[in-house]
Amino acid sequence: MHDQPTRQLEIARGTASAPKKRDDRKLKKTAVPGIYKRGKAYVVIYRADGKQRKETAPTMEAARRIKRSRETDSDRGEFQEQSRETLHAYAAEWIKRYHGNGRRGFREGSRKEYWRLLNKFALKYFKPSLRMTDITPRHLAEFVGWLADDEKQGKHLSDKTIGNATIPVRALLSTAVRAAQQPRLRPRAPTPRRQRDRRRRPRRDPRLHP
């Protein structure tokens, strides 16, 4: 340890080492779990896709907003590296859980028909690497143009066939958009048996004309 005269001599010669600064990068706990303070900024720590992630915010309020947003995304199962999910992978999972948009449900026969149409047209046209977040209206327009191209199809497809081919694609994308926009809903209370019995049996999707 240097004594005072030696320290002054080193300073005069310019050989003294700079005094150690306090480490402002150390995370300090706050009153809010998952939010830490580092220097003048706040750090939000959460887990997504099995990995720990961090985001920085200038104020506590901004950090709280990030935390709430990430928790909502996590509850919906949305924030799972969406940018990496492809149309092909999403379609394979979507077809298993899709229940239609109406109150009358979705028949298993329609589910099989949707999957047949997806495999025959959309999944044949769109590349396996196409990500859900990259799909634009232009992609759909080009898909319809491909369906209407007699040379590429090897035959002429009727307007009805082309329309049927786009139905499951539009339903799939509508589901993805709704899931991304709507907050997670609380589970509904069990429906009384009498009310369940009164419901009509699901009917065949009238839009399909296989």
Image (cartoon, grey):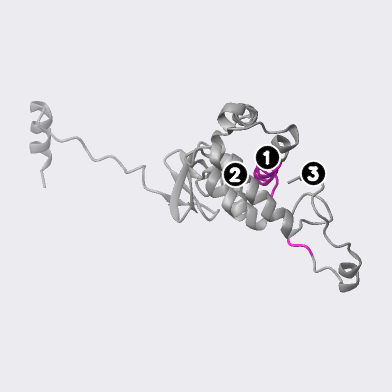
- Give, as a single range, the part of the protein colored magenta: 167-188
Dot 2: element: helix
> Residue 157: x and y, percent?
68, 33
Does residue 85 show up magenta in the picture? no
Which mark's residue is nearer the viewer, 3 or 2?
2
- The main secondary structure of the magenta stretch is helix
The type of residue carrying mark 3 is: Arg
Tell me the CA gap for discs 3 and 1: 11 Å
| Residue in the image at 19% along x and 35% along y | 18
Do callouts 1 and 2 mark residues in contact (Cβ within 8 Å)?
yes
| Residue in the image at 72% along x and 33% along y | 158
> Residue 118: x and y, percent?
62, 45
Do callouts 3 and 1 mark residues in contact (Cβ within 8 Å)?
no
In this rendering, position of residue 5 left or right of residue 90:
left
The label on residue 165 is 1
Above or below, 149 relative to 69 = above
Which residue carries the number 2 mark?
120
> Residue 134: x and y, percent?
54, 34
Which mark is first along the chain, 2 or 1? 2
Dot 3: element: loop
The type of residue carrying mark 2 is: Lys
Tell me the CA gap for discs 3 and 2: 18 Å
> Residue 71: x and y, percent?
59, 52
Which mark is first along the chain, 1 or 3? 1
The label on residue 185 is none
Is there any visible trace of residue 50 in the rendered image?
yes
The label on residue 207 is 3
Q: Dot 3, crowdedness within 10 Å: few (<14), some or many (≥20)?
A: few
Dot 1: element: helix
Image quadrant in which you'd find residue 93: bottom right
